[in-house]
Image (cartoon, grey):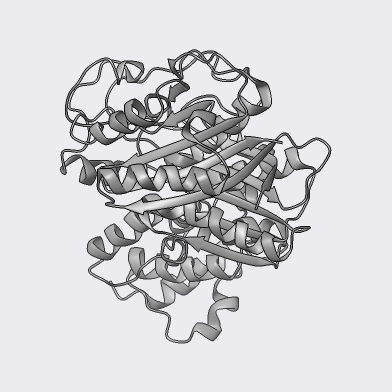
Amino acid sequence: MAVYVKGIGNISPQKTWGDTTLLSSPLAYVGDRLSCVEPDYSQFVDIRQLRRMSRILKMGVAAGSMALQESGIKVPDGIITGTGYGCLEDTGIFLSKMVENNENALNPTPFIQSTHNTIGSQIALLLQCQGYNQTYTQSAFSFENALLDATLELKDNPAKSFLVGGIDEITDLSHTIQHRFGIFRDRSVSSLDLFNTSTDGTLNGEGASYFVLSGEKGENDTVCLDSVATFYKPGMQYLMDGIENFLESASLKTVDIDLLLIGKSGDKRFDSEAEEVSSRLFKSCAIGLFKHLSGEYPTASAFAFWLGARIIQTQHIPQAVIHRKATRPQRNILVYNPYFGEYHSLILLRSC
Amino acid sequence: MEQLMEDLKRQIIEALNLKHLKPEDIGDEQPLFVEGLGLDSIDALELIVLLQQHYSIKMANPQDGPQIFKSVKTIAEYIRANQTT
């Protein structure tokens, strides 16, 4: 079932909001951490309500507001959020205070706001949206499951509209802990050179992307979500077959894909599958990369969804994204997002 | 008492993240809730924690909260009356 994209809001390590040409001046980061370029939140939320919100809440509320503004819809019928890590800042504060205060006299605010579903709840509170509200938190399938839920809901009620998003944040504490796992690069001079050197480790990223989706096409809609699929530790042949079957169920073949957006992370330990998929299945289409722009995080596929949708809308692939040039119009875009060799997801976007 | 009220204003601003205010913006007898600073029930819980963390005072009866947390002055008077050290 086609689900139409009515509005988009995206806060990321690039300037992806406001009046800017699509990734015309990509930002380069030194080190292993890409932090979001954030707007002035007082444009979106009353300053008195802002004081209690952590950064991820502010990013979620602002990205949601941007998407709703673009769609022209004031209050959606439901809010569906995907987040791998949830509200890390408040979780860190809550746990640290617990240790500092010897488990006595704990501050209520960080505790209340440490749960994953605070983001969707906060958006609903501000909008006074009392409809369906769901949060998915399954690591790198969180955003994909939010999309699947929206698709199922819209199959039953196509006229409804849902605010669907993927969101994750980096905090100093989470970055320090994750760095110990050896998943980030020790020395990175420029994030834009992520794919120019072959080494272990990727770059830590974050972002907040929300989309207004509906089952009914409006006259201004140009992008639709065709389908979503996830594969956990599939093995190479199963993955290859899975991609072909996925496309077949959308009445497409691999040659019909105009642009493959691959979530390669730059970590040589995990990128071999992505390279094999592109070299064996997608020999002629354009190929784009995005994790040198967004960094790696569980809901990075939401950044790719934003990128794919904007490419279809503008029919322009930013120079910073191009790995293999396009030779034809961008009608069918496949996002293939592998995450540390375990989670593999597919999102098919089409022009409509 | 003056010093205690000054300290309280700074601690309230920090605990409740009232970054848009300075201590001198809060009057000694200005109502803290609803029409005054516009604090709410979650802020009341934060103030109870503030009393525990900074002054080692555990409120015996939470129902006394509205009277105690009426203003900075009433909080300071409560601290004076209940602080043991």
Instruction: Residue A143 in the image: state x and y as whole percent.
Output: 48, 50
Residue A105 at least partly seen: yes
Q: In the image, is residue A18 above or below residue B16?
A: above
Instruction: Residue A236 in the image: state x and y as whole percent.
Output: 26, 43
What residue is at 36 percent from the left and 52 percent from the top? Answer: A231
Instruction: Residue B45 in the image: state x and y as whole percent.
Output: 49, 71
Q: In the image, is residue A137 above or below residue A268?
A: below
Front-most of residues A129 and B34:
A129
Q: Is residue A155 left or right of residue A253?
A: right
What residue is at 63 percent from the left and 44 percent from the top? Answer: A211
Quarter of the rendering containing residue B36: bottom right
Front-most of residues A260 and A221:
A260
Residue A55 at least partly seen: no
Quarter of the rendering containing residue A252: top right
Front-most of residues A290 and B82:
A290
Front-most of residues A119 and A289:
A289
Which quadrant, please, contains the C terminus of chain A?
A: top right
Q: How many marks?
A: 0
Instruction: Residue B30 in the image: state x and y as whole percent.
Output: 65, 60
Q: In the image, is residue A80 above or below residue A66?
A: below
Q: Is residue A24 left or right of residue A344?
A: right
Q: Is residue A351 left or right of residue A221?
A: left
